[in-house]
Amino acid sequence: MDVWVHAMETGTVRIKTRQAEPRHERRERRLLDVLTDRKWTAPLPVSCYAIEHPEGMIVVDTGANTRAGKPGYEPRWHLLAQRAARFSVDAAEEVGPRLSTLGHDPRSAATVVMTHMHGDHAGGLSYFEGVSVLMTEREASIATGRGAEINAYFRRNHPRWLKPSTVRFDSDPWETFDASIALTCDGAIRLIPTPGHTSGHLSVVIEQGDHLVLLAGDAVYSEQQLQRGTIDGVAESAAQHRDSMRRIRELCTRRNVIVVPTHDPEGARRLAERRYTVVEDPATEHKEKSDAYG
């Protein structure tokens, strides 16, 4: 059975270098470091994904929109949102036009899965009216509850119709994860808990015969970050973030895995070229694990 995964770039974002490479453990010090940093990364992709499966199209995250970073989109009082990200998104780059290029109407999707609800992942939700939007129970409670804005969930940018469906990870251990949820009847697409960046963060795994594709959201920013095991500068929980990365790295030593983070400049290319993510295995060190479609 063929399951196709398409990466869609919905513009780019530049973030502070201390968000990608933090110097401190405590979150308060990491956030202050990000705010006072004067250096920016190169433009990073803001990606989302379309999975074509016999049970229907599944969209993972919805990317950014053209209003991102513009006056009025984020509250003026939210210093991190105002000072720590610079977006560049054209109208043709939004998820709706991207899906149209693939021959899909966004409203024909079976499900939209949200790794988490930050604006660069939820910016295209308005295209999916009438489609089930799925996220963890924890993520939904924070993103739609009191105090959402403090945690960079800007409810005023959510579609009025949004009533998310939720899942809880409390059963079905899978590989290196203590729990999982089969999203499709054949189990080819599975949700796994990867908290840390946010406490309700999830990732999506797709079985592809001899390998896995892991759509990691912001569980990691890049393959290099995964190799180093370093947390990100705005992660809600350093301990959870490290544990999620540890489980992903261990999975990569057991299976052939293509890890595709949202903001990794090489993520879409690794997916297209089927280049497996290689992490240090004590038994084999850096064994090359890659091939091509041929």
Image: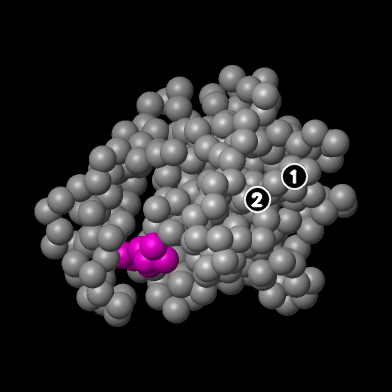
Mark 2 or mark 1: name the one nearer the start of the chain: 1
Residue 85 at x, y percent in the picture: 27, 49
Measured along the vertical axis of the image, is residue 162 above or below residue 177? above
Q: CA distance from mark 2 to mark 1?
A: 7 Å
Q: Is residue 97 magenta?
A: no
User: Tag 1's secondary structure?
Assistant: loop
* Amino acid bearing label 1: Asp
Q: Does any portion of residue 149 appear in the rendered image?
A: no
Instruction: Find residue 10 and report its image quarter.
Output: top left
Residue 131 left/right relative to 271? right
Residue drawn at x 15%, y 51% is 39
Measured along the vertical axis of the image, is residue 47 above or below residue 114? above
Tag 1 residue: 210
Q: Does any portion of residue 205 appear in the rendered image?
A: yes
| Stretch in magenta | 228-234
Measured along the vertical axis of the image, is residue 274 above or below residue 112? above
Nearest the viewer among 88 and 51 is 51
Nearest the viewer among 215 and 287 is 287
Label 1 CA crowd tier, 10 Å (few <14, some 14–19, many 20+) = few
Asked whether the beta carbons under mark 2 and mark 1 sit within 8 Å of each other, the answer is yes
Tag 2 residue: 256
Residue drawn at x 49%, y 40% is 267
Residue 181 at x, y percent in the picture: 75, 63
Look at the image and tell me in which quarter the N terminus lies.
top right
